[in-house]
Amino acid sequence: MNAIGMVSGKLWTGFLGPRIGLCNNALRAMSCHTNTQIVEEVAKLLELKAQLGTDDGKQMFALKTPKGTRDYNPKQMAIRESVFNTIISCFKRHGAETIDTPVFELKETLTGKYGEDSKLIYDLKDQGGELLSLRYDLTVPFARYLAMNKISNIKRYHIAKVYRRDNPAMTKGRYREFYQCDFDIAGQYDPMIPDAECIKVVHEILAELQLGDFRIKVNDRRILDGMFAVCGVPDDKFRAICSTVDKLDKASWEEVKNEMVGEKGLAPEAADRIGEYVRMHGGFDLAEKLLQDPQLSQNKHALEGLTDMKDLFKYLELFKITDKVIFDLSLARGLDYYTGVIYEAVLIRPQNVHPSEELVSVGSVAGGGRYDGLVGMFDHKGRKVPCVGVSVGIERVFSILEQKAEASEEKIRTTETQVLVASAQKNLLEERLKLTSELWDAGIKAEVLYKKNPKLLSQLQHCEETGIPLVAIIGEQELKEGVVKLRNVATREEVDVSRVTLVEEIKKRSIQS
């Protein structure tokens, strides 16, 4: 290397040397920091792994359903299915057709429709620019459906799940996820005729389900508004006071009055006057009496409501159900969208055994009313479609029927199998499968055990445990003769039936049982 090269090399090294050292130090520091981060992240992953479970798959966290929800086992589902069948049969008997709507709606669709209960709506996280909420009931989606599709009259039923961010009381049938069974009549009709049919529907369902004694309370929002006006409630407090009155089925009058005065700012004398009215209950006679009330009779809204209430009881008398219906001025129903008649069905029990016994409510199982303005809230021209409907609180019904089933220790069938195809000898799997297939093809609900050579006793025990009423037994002799030995599991009676007439015989016996 020449002198110039040596000099320039030393100069270059002298210039870069300190900087290279600094870079190396920085790299070591970064490497150290990165290693620390890696160690921390690995530690977090190991901690998460410990929480989730060990290598052998054992889970360490508690397995449970979310608060306010539950699973249903086959026996519970059998009860539910029976209830649904009863309700759907009633709805169809009254000429209703069914629809379905999404489980979530645009948040703005649900906002402002439920009064104080709006805080119970489940909001979903923003998805693709749309603010969504789980449906709170089936009525508001129904009104949106009518407005969106420009439908002016329909009689529909809808059975589906709804969601409420409420404090659940599982033993009382109050959940955050639950079914509603709705029946609604939309269209312009003469007053109180569809309203009376809705109440008749509730009566039929509760009577058929045999839940116990019940009453259907009725009132009218117009009567309530008139009552509030003559009692001195300011217009801007009507809905708030209505929501408070709605608590009278769960709280004493003193508690309700304290809320009116202390929280809602109502004058004590106005609350006292409301108290005089809300203690009244009766029927057609009460409507006539209130029409003579010097103050209520002068209020336009109350006069309309009381006149319609008289007509309602006339129709209910024709339906022969007035013994179960009570005109109750304390019934308010807090939802904002009601405009006319409102009703609620409650199960009752006697407070004592005295002949003048008082009936005490043990829970609401259905409710509804008229909502003539709700559809117009969704129509850009404000086009109104008068509606009236009822919703059956099915979870409360299920809870009661489950308790009754447990108390009676009755055996509940979880399948509808009509016959088990069995064999008394070995090597007849193919013949059993062939006969089972023939029965399936003929519409018979049949089962076969999934073993090549099951013992006859095991097959009969399966029938007793699951409630299968008949056993079709085949053997070498039966195959030769073209017959099947049909056994009644309950009586143990056996009879040879021709293979040709087997389907007909099973159907006949199924009808008899």
Image (cartoon, grey):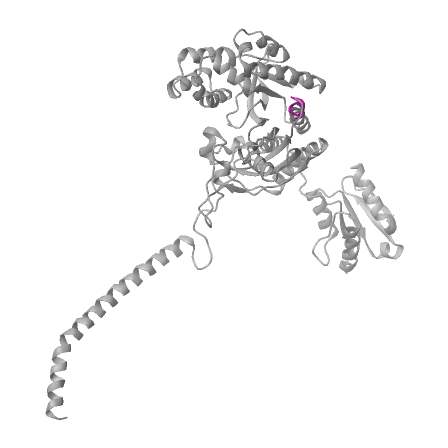
Find residue 468 and report its image quarter: top right
What residue appears at the point 56 percent right and 28 percent down from the top-left corner?
373
**Is 55 placed left or right of 426 in the picture?**
left
Above or below, comparing residue 347 to residue 171 in the picture: above
In the image shown, does 14 or 51 lie closer to the viewer?
14
Instruction: Specify the farthest residue to the bottom.
Output: 2
Image spot of residue 170 (x, y percent): 51, 34
Find residue 280 and report its image quarter: top right
Above or below, comparing residue 176 to residue 7 in the picture: above
Residue 287 shows up from this direction? yes
- Whether the magenta-drawn stretch holds residue 6 is answered as no
Residue 423 shows up from this direction? no
Image spot of residue 134 (x, y percent): 51, 40
> How many discs mark residues in the rendered view?
0
What residue appears at the point 87 percent right and 48 percent down from the top-left corner?
501
Q: Quadrant of the C terminus?
A: top right
Image spot of residue 460 (x, y percent): 73, 47
In the image shown, does 328 or 365 lie closer to the viewer?
328
Instruction: Specify the farthest residue to the right.
Output: 481
In the image shown, does 171 or 69 lie closer to the viewer?
69
Above or below, comparing residue 417 to residue 216 in the picture: below
Above or below, comparing residue 175 to residue 234 in the picture: below
**Is 418 placed left or right of 2 in the picture?**
right
Q: Quadrant of the N terminus?
A: bottom left
Which contiguous range is marked in magenta?
191-197
Q: Of helix, strand and loop, which mostly describes the magenta segment?
A: helix
Image spot of residue 164 (x, y percent): 49, 36
**Is 67 placed left or right of 472 in the picture?**
left
